[in-house]
Image (cartoon, helix red, strand yellow):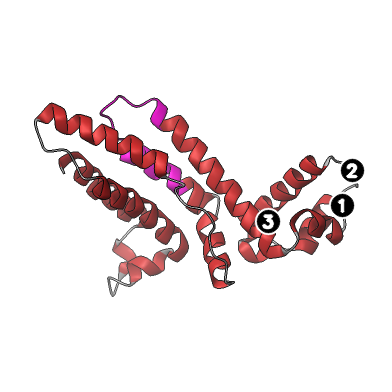
């Protein structure tokens, strides 16, 4: 068991979330348990309940932390784009990291099955606005009609959904479309989805 340390309330919450993230990464959502995290940190179960209330509230805070990190990464990425640039592949890599590598997709599924309802909206609103401005600029240069905002919103939602579903279902997604899915690769599927979305954003 780790040696107990005195921490400020904010530092304690960060430490708990860090430990929960490690458990999530190593064991999936089932590994994020109050008793295990308390043992990892050398604190009591009551200390975690004091900061987060319930296991579900801790999981929600963990998911929100990953979401904020994704939004920050997206903001840093799109800041370097040219006015009419849309790098869908770069966005796909960010979704892949958050949903698959950081296990956010499985965490969101676990919470949904537990009856959790997401609060708030518009997490990707600034991304949609930036992509839509780029589409409008490209259309203006090409002499095309201005794109519809709803098309941009659907495209970004589809990009997010493709990466989230692939992270949650794994090989089951490809197994559903072929008797022998051994010739199908999840990375190729995501590249295919990214390519379709990139073409749509560039042409419509």
Residue 23: mark: 3
Which of pointers 3 and 2 lies earlier in the amino acid sequence? 2
Residue 161: mark: none
Task: State if disc 1 and disc 3 touch (CB < 8 Å).
Answer: no
Q: CA distance from mark 2 to mark 1?
A: 8 Å
Task: State if disc 2 and disc 3 touch (CB < 8 Å).
Answer: no
Is residue 88 within the magenta segment?
yes
Give SS at disc 1: loop
* Residue 90 % position (x, y): 37, 38
* Residue 107 % position (x, y): 56, 60
Residue 5: mark: 2
**Magenta highlight range:** 78-96
Q: Residues within 10 Å of mark 2 (few under 14, many from 20)?
A: few
Up-down relation of residue 112 to residue 161 (above or below): below
The residue pinned by badge 1 equals: 42
* Residue 116 % position (x, y): 57, 67
Q: Residue at x 51, y 36 (%)?
A: 72
Q: Quadrant of the C terminus?
A: top left
Q: CA distance from mark 3 to mark 1?
A: 15 Å
Corner quadrant of residue 178: bottom left
Q: Residue at x 77, y 41 (%)?
A: 10
Up-down relation of residue 81 to residue 198 (above or below): above
> Who is closer to the viewer here, 31 or 122?
122
Is residue 204 within the magenta segment?
no
Which of pointers 2 and 1 lies earlier in the amino acid sequence? 2
């Amino acid at each position: 068991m780790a040696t107990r340390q005195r921490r400020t309330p904010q530092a304690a919450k960060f430490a708990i979330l860090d430990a929960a993230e490690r458990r999530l990464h190593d064991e999936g959502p089932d590994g994020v348990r109050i008793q295990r995290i308390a043992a990892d940190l050398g604190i009591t179960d009551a200390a975690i309940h004091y900061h987060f209330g319930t296991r579900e509230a801790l999981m929600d805070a963990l998911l929100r932390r990953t979401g904020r990190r994704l939004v920050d990464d997206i903001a840093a990425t799109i800041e370097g784009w040219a006015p009419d640039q849309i790098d869908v592949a770069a966005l796909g890599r960010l979704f892949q990291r958050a949903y698959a590598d950081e296990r956010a997709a499985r965490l969101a599924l676990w919470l949904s099955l537990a009856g959790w309802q997401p609060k708030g909206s518009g997490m990707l609103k600034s991304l949609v606005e930036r992509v839509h401005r780029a589409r409008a600029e490209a259309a203006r240069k090409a002499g095309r009609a201005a794109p519809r905002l709803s098309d941009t919103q659907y495209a970004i939602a589809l990009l997010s959904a493709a990466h989230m579903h692939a992270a949650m279902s794994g090989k089951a997604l490809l197994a559903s479309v072929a008797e022998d899915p051994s010739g199908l690769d999840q990375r190729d599927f995501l590249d295919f989805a990214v390519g379709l979305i990139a073409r749509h954003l560039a042409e419509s």
